Amino acid sequence: MKDSRIRGAEIVIKSLVAENSEYIFGYPGGAIMPVYDALYDYADQIKHVLTRHEQGAIHAAQGYARVSGRVGVCIATSGPGATNLITGLADALIDSTPLVCITGQVASALLGTDAFQETDVVGFSMPGTKWNIQVRRVEDIAPAIAKGFHIAGTGRPGPVLIDITKDAQNALGEFSYVPCLGIRSYRPYPVVNMSEIERAAEVINKAERPYVVFGQGVVIGTAEAELKAFLDKTGIPAACTLLGSGALSEDHPLYVGKLGMHGNYAPNLLTNKCDVLIAIGMRFDDRVTGDLKRYAKQAKVVHLELDNAEIDKNVRCEVSVLADCKESLPLLTAKVNENNHADWVSKFRELEEDEKSAVVSLDLSPTKIGLTMGEVIRYINEFKNDNAVLVTDVGQHQMIAWRYFKYKQTRTQITSGGLGTMGFSLPAALGAQLADVNRQVVCVVGDGGIQMTIQELGTIMQTKAPVKVVLLNNDFLGMVRQWQQLFFDKRYSFTELDNPDFVKIAEAYNMKATKVSERGNLRDTVAEMMSHQGPYFLEVVVEKEDNVFPMIPTGCSVEEVRLT
Amino acid sequence: MNRYTVSLFTENFIGILNRVTLIFTRRGVNIDALTASESKEDGVHRITIEVTTTEDQVIQIVKQTEKIIDVIKSFYYLDEEVVYQEIALYKIPISSLDPGLEKVIRQYNARIISAEKEFVVIEMTGHKEDTKALLEILQDFNILEFARSGRVAVAKPMGTIAQYLNN
């Protein structure tokens, strides 16, 4: 009789196929070689992207997950392969990105012996994962992967790591894949408590100056239409967090802008003028709130949130609704009165004019010689489609791109929000592009960040992913330099960079590459890039010492937001 | 600052204790004592942790422990909301045995649970204040070794983990 058993390594691949995974982002090595060997026979069922570093693999998986809304998959070997995932795990955990990461591990007999490329990966990754496990027996592989996908993709999503010993990969076992539908100790979707909905509606119905602040929870819950319906009925103005951008089109008449340290003037300032603050799928990050002791103290706070640990963590609320906002928003919309807050909304519009004259016009239509980051984004807006994805790195360019990019659709904003991971954008843009090759994906990156993962240009070359890379080069670690200028007496301690010829580097990776240093060529070059079929690298030399404003300096209140 | 008992019901999987303690560590809250064992429910483990901290911190810690996939439910209690007990063992050299020791053992409701050639082991259960008081007295009897457990505690409120699991 034919033996129906297959190797654990093949079970890994068959499990990923059973979960309908489209892509694996990974990097081979000793302890994961059986899995790579098994993968060789499945090229027609699952695509593998060989990155140039494991950090690139996990950020690419994050970009893929954030654009597609599906669980990103990443594979690495033991030891350094696995430890190179750590930054991405921490990033995915704080930004609620669903990932299943599979690492190879030395044979179980060698565990704990300091064997070659052995590290305690489960220990290392514990604080950086939603869940992790080490699998040492072939029969435990498929159930662990099934459980991993369930945990990663449900509730508040997050990264999962499954560490599989080499002997388990090599051992023979029966394959049958049973998707995980529930875990006794894990209840990802709390049942809506109707009395909370009623109390929330009561508070909102009595409000004179209600204000909605929404975050990525709306995107994760695919509650964009539910948010819009709530706003349309109540007439309440709404502002978004960094990761909430795109959940509501910026064209919506009640959209009033962006929150936080480098957000818009009115949304920050008026946080301390509203009487009811309705927070939807956001977690009151310190970059949003500034000084908590002076944050919205006058307001009754209503918090719609899926993660119980976020409720009352930073801001005490009057009413909390513990549920997925996809479920709670329609129930709330049914209970709130139709309303119109035109006078209150007009307060936002008045202050918006102040920001326009003091900041926006200078950023977007500068009169000085040097190029601004803002005008580059302005031209990207001119030539992008509504569903174009913006992927940014971390720093000044991230804040400027966020401020000026016109978000029209959901899942168009991919950035490292919570962790602030420099080097995130280039691999994340690759993953974002592979999630949908028909969408424009623009990676806006600084000269500091790009050099942290610049090797991924090689992956872009190999996959031919048509990513548009826009390097905003000021030969500085610009955000740190800005802080040094404003708060450290202009002592520019180790922030200036002697940079390489980036165009030559991009060309060496077979990319179409251009450098623009003068305003005259900028618009046409951006137009050319945006319509180019393949990958494109555009370096724009921008003013060396421009600053990002508005700004709420650390420790200041939202009402102390500065325009200059 | 108050003394709290954090009571966690968990699956019995490798690494769960590590995940739980990481949450305390991250917030810089020291664990005063810890015990772990099976609970009344099949396959449900119970971890009891004693901490001294603020109510704000303990609420956040409890909520964050509940986010751990393999944690079923967490609770926190003030001392007056639990019935709790600790056990202490004292190793005393045979040479220290005298009528004075008998008096101490009677007074503290302690007992000798083992007698070896060179030493006896005295056991006492009680709250930390009581076992500590006995320890101080036994210093005069040349105590050789002392060990005290973390607290085990049952809650006074009547809801049970079984009810929670059935919901």
Image: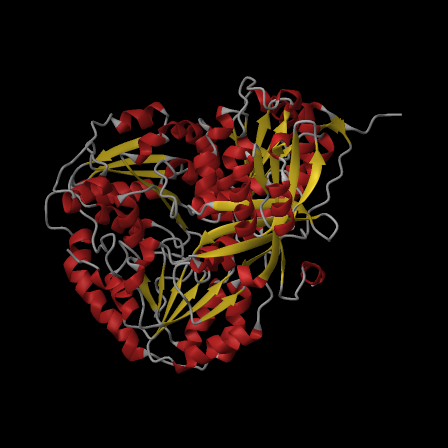
Q: Position of residue B49 (x, y in %)?
A: 55, 49
- Answer above or below: position of A193 versus A399: below
Horizontal relation, residue A2 to residue B97: left or right: right
Query: Which quadrant, please, contains the C terminus of chain B?
Result: bottom right
Q: Position of residue A475 (x, y in %)?
A: 20, 33
Q: Residue at x 44, y 62 (%)?
A: A312
Query: Which quadrant, please, contains the N terminus of chain B?
Result: bottom left
User: Residue farthest to the right?
Assistant: A1
Q: Kindly tell me whether residue A438 is visible in this rendering.
A: no
Q: Residue at x 54, y 58 (%)?
A: B76
Q: Residue at x 26, y 60 (%)?
A: A264
Residue A38, picture quadrant: top right
Q: Position of residue B156 (x, y in %)?
A: 62, 64
In-front residue for pair A189/A398: A189
Horizontal relation, residue A34 to residue A232: left or right: right
Q: Position of residue A390 (x, y in %)?
A: 37, 47
Q: Residue at x 44, y 52 (%)?
A: A411
User: Residue farthest to the front?
Assistant: B99
Scheme of image coloration: secondary structure
Q: Kindly tell me whether residue A33 is visible in this rendering.
A: yes
Horizontal relation, residue A226 to residue A540: left or right: right
User: Residue farthest to the top?
Assistant: A116
In-front residue for pair B19/A219: B19
In-front residue for pair B126/A497: B126
Give the number of callouts.
0
